[in-house]
Image (cartoon, helix red, strand yellow):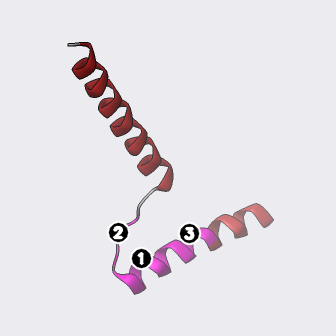
Amino acid sequence: MKIQVAIARKVLVAVWHMLTKDEDFIDVYLKRLEKKAELLNEIQALESFVLE
């Protein structure tokens, strides 16, 4: 029961912040993965530039 209440509270806090700030939900984990992929692409581009 404690876990369910904790999860419900997290969801309600997230919804409250989205509604009061008029913002979309941004998943921090997915954002971090996207940034990592961008960095890997930039590294590959630099490596191919240096090797040419």
Name the amino acid, label 3: Val
SS state under label 1:
helix
Within-10-Å neighbours for mark 3: few <14, some 14–19, many 20+: few
Residue at 44% from the left image edge and 47% from the top image edge: 30
> What residue did someone put label 2 on?
24
Residue 49 vertical placement versus 17 (above, below):
above
Numbered label attached to residue 42: none
Give the Cα separation between the discs numbered 3 and 1: 11 Å
**CB-based contact (under 8 Å), mark 1 and mark 2:** yes
Numbered label attached to residue 18: 1
Q: Is 15 in the magenta?
A: yes
Give the Cα separation between the discs numbered 2 and 3: 14 Å
Within-10-Å neighbours for mark 2: few <14, some 14–19, many 20+: few
- Is residue 40 among what the camera can see? yes
SS state under label 3:
helix
Q: Nearer the viewer, mark 2 or mark 3?
A: 2
> What residue did someone put label 3 on?
11
**What residue span does the magenta drawing correspond to?**
10-25
Name the amino acid, label 2: Asp
**CB-based contact (under 8 Å), mark 2 and mark 3:** no
